[in-house]
Structures are given as structure tokens and as C-alpha cells.
């Protein structure tokens, strides 16, 4: 029997890698072998992403799924080949992405799920460090060690370690507990004048990352409405009331926006701001609530200490909802 086509069955599920059932079969995709080729390629990232529905309420949950790719090699009549079939692969999937220069199917970080090696926290406030449990054995915050255990469950593949208030340094070690992988410096910022805001976004590794905006903030809102001209003349009296408007508003609503400023940061923080601009999931902690926002600014000029001396970023955000509740 000659290899002619592949039937790919995708199982997408949470829990452990072996906890799938037939109910977890999400897609069946068939693809024909191109004449002269010996391999068939499938792009499954967008299919899997449909099952990573991310929500955030300051709770830092692990959003990951197992993907079991069950490939059945068949001949032209649809009969499974007697040898080499099926091909089964199991993957852990996060809602991350690579840059073009990373190449195809790039292996992203398997330890601390951050690109920056500097975190800015509000003085006297604890922080969160996202790590990938499979690739980390121990994390040392100042002089305190925390052992990392990977149970294989998707609910703990991304772990958010608490960074105690006013910590200064985090060291991330490999699964052997001795090989140092990353050193992350903590900068504790005292802000006595302005109200700092914490913005949380999904970064390139598919993890929640916090960024504090310490300096001046400005809120504004823009009203949206329609109007029409109405007839206010009374047939009975052939007159009109001057208390009734000739023009009437309807479908009135508004959208609110906020402008935030990071305060001074180092060049290493440029990657964090870049990922914030690219994120599709962003929230702000405001008045005791976690509210969805959308980066309104669409361009960014990278600042450097050589060109700009002091580096800070001002970013505009729209709140991702109308001022008047019209959720239907």
C-alpha cells in the first residue's frame, strides 16, 4: 500500500496528558500528499488557540492545554497503512507567539516566562513571577528557596510565584536545582505624588505579566450619539411648546480612555512595553476592580539611554466597554 493521505485527529484537553477521552476530539483534518513529496505538514496553532479562552480577575490562573495529535497514514482508498501508522505526538500548548526572527516552531523560554530581567514593583507591594514548571527546579527570592513541583496537570504548568514586598533579587534554577538560568532584579519604586496603576497583560509566552505605571495619569471620555429633527407642532392648537426640543438625541453612549506613564525604566524594559502593545488581552486594576482595556497607541519609538538619557513611556488605553451598560 502506498502512502497517499493523512487523517489527523486532534484531541485538546486540560488535566494530565493521559486524561483525554473521545469527547476531547476537537478536529479531524485530512490532507493529501503532494506528488513528489514524502511529508505532509499541518498548521494546528490557530485550531488549538480556539480552546485557550483567557480570563483574568487578578487571579493568575494557568491557561494551558494538552494537544494529542493522532495521525493515521492511509492509502488512496482510505485504508490505514500496515506499518508506520498511527503517528502520535503530545504537546503542551500556551497562548504565546514567536517573532519572525525566531524562526519556525521556535522554542521559547522554559523557565521564567518573561523577556525582561528587571521588574518594577510599587514599594511595599508584593508581585508575581510567572514560571514554566517543567523547566524550573528551584527559585530563590533573596535568600529564600522555593522548590517547584510539576504534577503534569495543566492547572499548574504556569506557576505564579509570590514575590514578597520589597524583595531585591530573584534567581531561577534548572531542574537540577544548581544550574542558574536567570537572575531577575526587582526595583521597588516609591511614588508619593501620583496614583500608580497596575496593568496586567498576556505576554509572548502566554503568561500574565504585570507592569506598573507610576507617574501622571489622565482620564477622558468621548460621547457618541445620533440625533434627528422631530415635528413638535400640535394639530389641535397649530402651535408648539418651546419646552420641547426640535432636535432629539438617541443611541447616546460614551467610551472612556486613560493615559498612563511608566516613570523611568531601563532599556531592558523595552521588550515588556513592546509585548504590551502586541497583547490581545490587557486589564487594569482600578478602584478595586479588574477592567479590560485595549492599547489605543499604535506606534512605539524604542528609547535608549544613549539617545534619550532617561527612558519612560506614555501609553493611551481605551476601556473595552461602553460607559452606559448596553450588554445584551
Image (tube, helix red, strand yellow):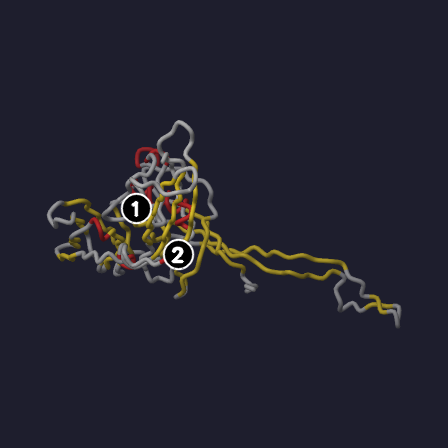
- Image coordinates for residue 156, horizontal then vertical, percent: 26, 58
Q: On the picture, is 299 further left or further right than 92?
A: right
**Please, is residue 68 above or below residue 2 in the view?**
below
Q: On the picture, is 3 further left or further right than 151?
A: right
Asked where in the image residue 64 lies, by quadrant, the reply is bottom left
User: On the rendered image, what quadrant is the N terminus found in?
Assistant: top left
- Image coordinates for residue 237, horizontal then vertical, percent: 88, 71
* Disc 1 crowd, CA 10 A, few/some/many (<14, 14-19, 20+): few
Asked where in the image residue 192 lies, by quadrant, the reply is bottom left
Q: Toward the viewer: 312 or 27? A: 27
Which secondary structure lies at badge 1?
strand
Q: Toward the viewer: 39 or 299? A: 39
User: On the rendered image, what quadrant is the C terminus found in?
Assistant: bottom right
Question: Would you name the residue on which mark 2 appears?
Answer: 54
Q: Nearer the viewer, mark 2 or mark 1?
A: 1
Sequence-wise first label, 2 or 1: 2
Q: Toward the viewer: 309 or 73? A: 73
Question: Would you name the residue on which mark 1 appears?
Answer: 88
Task: Name which residue lies at 40% across and 48% down.
Answer: 279
Amino acid at each position: 500500500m502506498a502512502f497517499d493521505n493523512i487523517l489527523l485527529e486532534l484531541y485538546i484537553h486540560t488535566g494530565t496528558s493521559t486524561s483525554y477521552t473521545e469527547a476531547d476530539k476537537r478536529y479531524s483534518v485530512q490532507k493529501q500528499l503532494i506528488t513528489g513529496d514524502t511529508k505532509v505538514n499541518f498548521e494546528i496553532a490557530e485550531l488549538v488557540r480556539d480552546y485557550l479562552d483567557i480570563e483574568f480577575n487578578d487571579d493568575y490562573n494557568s491557561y494551558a492545554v494538552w494537544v494529542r495529535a493522532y495521525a493515521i497514514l492511509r492509502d488512496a482508498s482510505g485504508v490505514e497503512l500496515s506499518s508506520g501508522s498511527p503517528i502520535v505526538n503530545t504537546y503542551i500548548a500556551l497562548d504565546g507567539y514567536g517573532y519572525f526572527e525566531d524562526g519556525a516552531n521556535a522554542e521559547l523560554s522554559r523557565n521564567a516566562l518573561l523577556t525582561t530581567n528587571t521588574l518594577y514593583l510599587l514599594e511595599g507591594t508584593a508581585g508575581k513571577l510567572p514560571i514554566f514548571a517543567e523547566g524550573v527546579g528551584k527559585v530563590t527570592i533573596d535568600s529564600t528557596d522555593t522548590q517547584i513541583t510539576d504534577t503534569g496537570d495543566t492547572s499548574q504548568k504556569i506557576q505564579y510565584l509570590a514575590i514578597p514586598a520589597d524583595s531585591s533579587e530573584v534567581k531561577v534554577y534548572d531542574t537540577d536545582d544548581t544550574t542558574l538560568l536567570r537572575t531577575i532584579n526587582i526595583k521597588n519604586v516609591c511614588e508619593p505624588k501620583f496614583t500608580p496603576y497596575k496593568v496586567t497583560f498576556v505576554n509572548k509566552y502566554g503568561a500574565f505579566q504585570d507592569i506598573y505605571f507610576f507617574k501622571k495619569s489622565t482620564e477622558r471620555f468621548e460621547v457618541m450619539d445620533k440625533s434627528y429633527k422631530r415635528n413638535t407642532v400640535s394639530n389641535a392648537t397649530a402651535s408648539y411648546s418651546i419646552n420641547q426640543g426640535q432636535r432629539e438625541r438617541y443611541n447616546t453612549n460614551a467610551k472612556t480612555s486613560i493615559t498612563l506613564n511608566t516613570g523611568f525604566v531601563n532599556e531592558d524594559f523595552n521588550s515588556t512595553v513592546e509585548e504590551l502593545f502586541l497583547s490581545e488581552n490587557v486589564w487594569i486594576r482600578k478602584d478595586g476592580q479588574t477592567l479590560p482595556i485595549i492599547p489605543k497607541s499604535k506606534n512605539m519609538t524604542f528609547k535608549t539611554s544613549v539617545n534619550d538619557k532617561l527612558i519612560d513611556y506614555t501609553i493611551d488605553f481605551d476601556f473595552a466597554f461602553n460607559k452606559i451598560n448596553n450588554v445584551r
